[in-house]
Image (cartoon, helix red, strand yellow):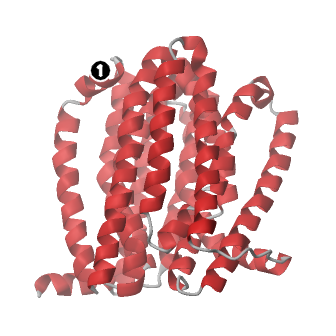
Amino acid sequence: MLIKQKRLLENFLSLSVLQALNMVLPLLTFPYIVRVIGVDYFGVLNLVLSILMLFNIFIAFGFELSATKMISTNRNDINKVSEMFFSILYSKFLLLVVSILIFLLLFQNINYISENILLFYMTSGLLIGNLLFPTWFFQGIEQMKYITIITAVIKVISTISIFVFITEKNDYLLLPLINSIAAIISGLIAIYFAIKKFKLIFYKPNFYQIKEQLKSSFHFFLSCVANQGSRHLAITLVGANFGNITTGYYTIADKLYMAIISLVGVVSQTIYPYMSAEKNLILFKKIFKFVMTVTCLVLIPVFYYNEELLYLIFNLKNQVLSDIFMIFMISVPLGIISQLIGFPLLAAFGFSAYANNSLIYSAVIYIIALIFVTLYLNQILFIAYCSLLFRFTQLSFRLFYIKKTGLLSLLLKKENE
């Protein structure tokens, strides 16, 4: 038990360092980029990124969730781990080929893509890097320190490169290029290290095995489409209907929201394998209380000084930006609670279908609301309110499921004891 808890603590610290880098380094470059290239170019870059991230979700196909659990369960069987490792990589490469064909079709029929094709090429390296980087493998074997070391070095170098090479508005194309090169290098190093360090045996899967991997991960893929895909769809709709500057404002608020939520992602990713194996409700409850306490302490000053905070960070004073930001901040507690009772709780106790379904159902409601608002109301604040609706419905479904499965009564019983 002590060994497992030590590994849990080590993974938590590794993920914390990694997430700190993912948060602190962008917080250094994020305001700098907005100030140098302007809100309009920032909006263009993020619209292109959101379109490509829809393809990234398709290529990832939910393996970050399904493969993590499979690797964790079979980590002592090197043959089984090797088979899963290479089957997933082959599956992702196959999905990449399909994505390229779809993109070429879109290129021929959508003017925006053809007009900004160079920007799409510059950004597409992120897809290659994300495909190669086997985060799911390191999470499954609970050896997150390796991800931390690899990512930290590359991120520091890319961050320095941004400050050195992006010094004026016309340098905006260098940002996706720097990020793409960093992602590809990280992916290559990580995949080489995974194979060599853990002595994985090369395995060439057949079509049936690839089909089985895709089939087993399909429900997780749907949840990723619901969660991440709906977010990128919202940015795409904003870009298509409200122009580059408004897209920049919306993306700024969205990225700040995701920065806060990603901190909780560290906790979720760390305890998910442990909870899957140990089903430790007492530990979960302690972590839940701690996270919610910290969340409240952070959000109170953010609510009160939101305009001053935005001006201090981005040198921007705009009522639309402030209003969108506040709506996203209201969503934070809902998103955090929903995240914690999702995969660290429901999925770990064998109810991953419920965790996934809650995302899928709420995303369907979210997308319908987005389309309605875009077609009939055409106001940016209503798009932001749709995000709040998404978090609220997702949390409602998950609360219903933990009550239905009896997990809620178990948590309350433990509390009383």
Seen in the image, is 81 located left or right of residue 97? left
Q: Residue at x 63, y 60 (%)?
A: 191
Where is residue 134 shown, x and y percent of the image? 59, 62
Q: Residue furthest left?
A: 417
- When the figure is inspected, residue 23 is found, relative to residue 59, above or below; the finding is above
Q: Residues within 10 Å of mark 1 (few under 14, many from 20)?
A: few
Amino acid under label 1?
Tyr
Seen in the image, is 341 located left or right of residue 59? left
Q: Residue at x 31, y 82 (%)?
A: 3
Seen in the image, is 121 located left or right of residue 392? right
Q: Which residue has dot 1 on it?
A: 311
- When the figure is inspected, residue 321 is found, relative to residue 24, above or below; the finding is above
Q: Residue at x 80, y 32 (%)?
A: 110
Seen in the image, is 119 located left or right of residue 260? right
One can see residue 54 in this view: no
Q: Which quarter of the rendering shows the C terminus?
A: bottom left
Could you say which quadrant of the image residue 265 lies in? bottom left
Could you say which quadrant of the image residue 204 lies in? bottom right
One can see residue 103 in this view: yes
Q: Secondary structure at mark 1?
A: helix
Where is residue 123 shown, x and y percent of the image? 66, 35
- When the figure is inspected, residue 165 is found, relative to residue 51, above or below; the finding is above
- When the figure is inspected, residue 240 is found, relative to residue 104, above or below; the finding is above
Q: Nearer the viewer, residue 67 or 111?
A: 67
Where is residue 269 shown, x and y percent of the image? 41, 65
Where is residue 125 shown, x and y percent of the image? 68, 41
Q: Nearer the viewer, residue 393 or 409?
A: 409
